[in-house]
Structure formats: C-alpha cells, structure tokens
Image (cartoon, rainbow, N blue to C red):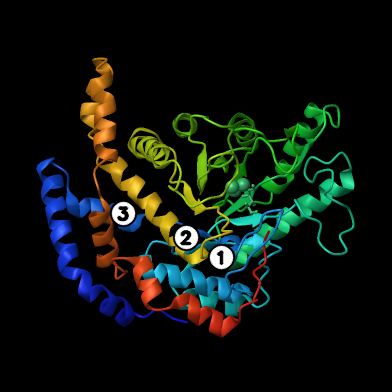
Amino acid sequence: MIITAEHIQSSNKPQEIAHARAFNFLAENLDKKGLNVDLLIRQLQELQIAIPSWALGTGGTRFGRFSGGGEPATLIQKIQDVGLLHALNRSSNAISLHIPWDIPEDYDQIGQAAAAVEIGFDAVNSNTFQDQAQQKHSYKFGSLANSDEAARELAIAHNIEVIEIGKKLGSKALTVWLADGSSFPGQQSFRKSLQHTFESLQKIYQRLPSDWQMLIEYKPYEPYFYSTVIPDWGTSFLLANKLGEKARTLVDLGHHLPNTNIEQIVATLMTEGKLGGFHFNDSKYGDDDLTVGSIKPYQLFLIFNELVAGFSETKNPKPAWMIDASHNLKDPLEDLLQSVEAIKLAYAQALIVDRKALAYAQETRDLAMAQGLLQDAFRTDLRPLLQESVRQSGGAISPIGTYRELRVRETLIRERGKDSKSSGL
Ligand code: AOS
Ligand code: ZN
Ligand code: ZN
Ligand code: ZN
C-alpha cells in the first residue's frame, strides 16, 4: 500500500475552506502577539520524530495479546509502515531499529525500501534483555553488569555488532537500555554491578564512530523489582560523563517514579550538554507506553518549554526525537499519528511562550504572571497551525481522517493477512 500525493490532495480538498478559516483566525492572533507565523511553521516542519520499529505491531501485556491484523512481518514492511505515517504527517522521516529483531538481510534492498518512502535510520537499539536461540551465555542475571565475565563479553560483542549494522544503514546513534538489576535485597553488589556496567560500556564506547552518540536510558524498575543498575538520570549522567563527549542521557518519559519532575531533569541535563534524546510516550502508573499526550499533556508542554528555552540558552546539541510506545488496544498506526501530533503540539505551544515576559516575571517574583504566561500558551489551540505546517509539507490536514478514508488498515490486512506477526515484545 502506498499513499500518493493525489490521495492526500483529494482527501484535503473538502477540508480546505474550513481549515483556511481556522488557520487565518489563529495566524492573525499570533501575529498580533508579535509572533512570526511563517517561522513557527518552518520550526514545526523541521521537527521530525523517529518511529520505533517495535511499535508498528500490536504489543502485548503479560496476560495476552490481541492483534488487529495486517502487522508488518518483515523489516521492509516496517519501513513501509513508517512511510505511510510520513506520507500522512510529513513528520516521521526515520525509523529506529531494534537488533536482533530487525537484522537486515540485504542492505541494498533495505536502503532502497527506505529511500522509496523518504525515510532514514535513527538510533539503533541493542537488546540484551532476552536470550536468543542457542545463545552461549544467558542474560538471566544481567548483561553488561553480569558477574559472569563471559556473559558480559557476549553483551559487549552484541552492542558492537549493532553499531556495525547501524553504520551500514546510516544511523548515528546507539541506544542502550539495560534490564540488568535485581529483585531481592542482597542479590547482587550495587557497586560491582555499576562498575561492570561502566567498564562494559567503555569497551562499546571505544568502538563508536567519531560522529556517533551513545544514548544511555535509565529506568527505576522492571523487569526486576528491587534495583536496576541505571535507575535514574543521575546514574546515566554519571556514566555518560565518565565515558566521554559522545555519550549522553536518553529520557524515556515512562521511566520515572510517580510525580518526578521530568522537566527539571531536562533542564539540568541541557545545562550540562548531556541530553541526548527522548523516548516519548505517556503513562499514569509506570512504564505504561501509552499514546503521547493522552494522560499528561501539560507535563509534555512543560518539558518542551524547557527544551525550547534550552535550545537558545545552552549548548546542548539537538536531541534525538523518538517515540517508544506499545499499542495493546488501538491500531498502532493511528496511535503513532496521535503521538506525533501531541509532540508537535507541545512543541508549538512552547514556541509561543512569551520568554521575555516570563524572564521578567521570574525576576520580579510575579508568580501569578509566570504561571499565567505558561498556561496562556498551553491553552491556545494551535491545531490549525500544526495542520497548516503539515499541509504545506504535502501532508494531510487530518492524518487519521485520511488514513481511515483510504482504508489503510483494511488494505494492509488484505495484503499481509489477519495473523501476520511483528517481531518485538
Ligand atoms: C524499556 O523499557 C525501554 O523503554 C527500551 O527503550 C526498550 O528497548 C524498548 O522499549 C523496546 O522494548
Ligand atoms: Zn525506552
Ligand atoms: Zn520503557
Ligand atoms: Zn516505556
């Protein structure tokens, strides 16, 4: 299934008059506030969010899995699915692969499939949280942190192999998430496991090309429930600092204990130039991996508020923008369209914050004004601006509407079958 420019145009056509009315009204108001609408549109167009290969199929819980059908069963099909998203929203021009779930067989063929739908390859993810068939040493008690040197060496070799795969695809980053940890007090030495983790990461870091980054995730619990070796941003930051310039922290929004102030973490990391990337998702309780913006859109806005401030006030390089989600109930492609839209809306809201007035309110300790300035931006309905930016890029005014109108899922089920199964968790 391919979505063409003609498909998009004919789907946009009946919406154009109403859209133009809403956009012009908004643009006039933004203009009156002294905002440059054309610049906002360009900034929105430039924000591209990578799609995780593992979120294109139906996720499961430990209780069951209910596929919606038409899942991409091969890497090429996953690339094509991201191509469908990108054709609709012009905002998802890259895929993030997980190895060994997505090992390419024929690199030329994979490269061509990606080029055909105008997408590239974002960070490659290593997987040392599962044992593969015939694996010599188990990761049951850890990978880079394992007390067994042979298991550590295997995990190091795997990460180096992932870098090699990424190099052939044009990726520029390796994301490391470790499940390593313990479920019972006394099970392992905190200090030894952290030291092993550092030394293992160092060996991987030595093999990182000069224009690559190593992105280090943190997570307080799960799959183990007493400790993890990299439980929080502080530990990730510590490792990144010790490793060197190319290592940075990756913030997965679901990897925090309840009520953690994530926007403050973002601000601190940016000040130190160590914010490497994001795994966007949303959650109510833990690593729920729900649609971005579905539970805490204000938090998402506050995070973007720090990001936008950090872009001009710190030297932090542009972070890698990725989604990390799991779809148990919704159509994965619809869910991803909603997630990308939520991210871009939060970005747009942060872009219209009156930063001069906010700085003045902070200096003069005008608390009501400071809060009001943020909420004024958050409560401005910027959807027509986002729609206009996508429309001008050749995308759909209502991506999900067009997706449904074109009967994309039905077509994918027809092409791939009801029971096709995507690799992943
Ligand atoms: C796991 O909780 C992390 O979020 C990782 O990013 C992981 O690699 C990804 O979720 C795929 O399972
Ligand atoms: Zn993640
Ligand atoms: Zn996670
Ligand atoms: Zn998650």
Specify the quadrant that holds the C terminus.
bottom right
Viewer can see residue 221: yes
Q: Which of pointers 1 and 3 lies earlier in the amino acid sequence?
A: 3
Residue at image position (66%, 46%) is 177
Q: Residues within 10 Å of mark 2 (few under 14, many from 20)?
A: many
C-beta proximity under 8 Å, tags 3 and 2: no
Q: How many marks?
A: 3
Q: Is residue 335 left or right of residue 185?
A: left
C-beta proximity under 8 Å, tags 2 and 1: yes
Q: Identify residue type, mark 1.
A: Leu
Q: Identify residue type, mark 3.
A: Leu
Q: Which of pointers 2 and 1 lies earlier in the amino acid sequence?
A: 1
Residue identified by numbered label 3: 44
Element type at mark 3? helix
Residue 130 image offset from top left, x and y in percent: 77, 55
Residue 252 image offset from top left, x and y in percent: 55, 43
Q: Residues within 10 Å of mark 3 (few under 14, many from 20)?
A: many
Residue identified by numbered label 2: 336
Q: Residues within 10 Å of mark 1 (few under 14, many from 20)?
A: many
Residue identified by numbered label 1: 56
Taking 152 as reference, is 69 above or below it? below
Mark 3 Cβ and ligand 2 under 8 Å apart: no
Residue at image position (58%, 67%) is 169
